Image (tube, helix red, strand yellow):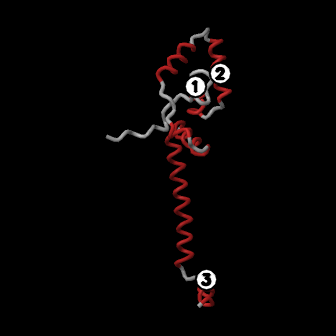
Amino acid sequence: MSTQPPSRTKFYLNKRGGKMLGVCAGLADYTGFDVTLVRILFVFGVVMGGGALIPVYLIAGWLADDEPRELRETDPEEKKFWQNVRASPSRSARDIKSRFRDIDRRLAEIEQYVTVENRSLAREIEQLR
């Protein structure tokens, strides 16, 4: 029985980058914000909320899964891509479709250049013979 690969759109604890349970570091990875900003906002929320966020933090640290090893070794560009997918899946799909259209257009230009009679290219090939 095969297991499912880890989801890149799920929230995970980041215990390597975390100070206590890795919740703030996991939120920073998930949202794309700087971890220091997330920690400052958490402390501000604790102070303004009279400590109401502390149980939420502890419950999140207890319930959330640790970040899988497969997801730790990603390059920054891939990490940014998946953060954008989480933020707006439809926009990410449009961006991918646009990139594929651009690649298809450039490929068509290359095909046209190679397949259409190109006198200078034909001359160079004849000179090589």
> Quadrant location of residue 29?
top right
- Residue 41: which disc? 2
Q: Are marks 1 and 2 in contact (CB under 8 Å)?
A: no
Residue at mark 1 to residue at mark 2: CA–CA distance:
15 Å
Along the polypeptide, which appears first: circle 1 or circle 2?
A: 1
Residue at mark 2 to residue at mark 3: CA–CA distance:
63 Å
Q: Amino acid at mark 3?
A: Leu
Determine crowd level at label 1: few under 14, some 14-19, many 20+ residues with C-alpha closer than 10 A: many
Q: Amino acid at mark 2?
A: Leu
Of discs 1 and 3, which sits in the foreground?
A: 1
Report the residue marked by disc 1: 22
Q: Note whether 126 is above or below 79 in the view shown.
A: below
Determine crowd level at label 3: few under 14, some 14-19, many 20+ residues with C-alpha closer than 10 A: few
Q: Note whether 111 is above or below 117 in the view shown.
A: above
Q: Amino acid at mark 1?
A: Gly
- Residue 107: which disc? none
Q: Quadrant of the C terminus?
A: bottom right
Along the polypeptide, which appears first: circle 2 or circle 3?
A: 2
Identify the residue at image location x=31%, y=40%: 1
Identify the residue at image location x=67%, y=22%: 40
Q: Position of residue 71 (x, y in %)?
A: 52, 39
- Residue 121: which disc? 3
Q: Nearer the viewer, residue 3 or 11?
A: 3
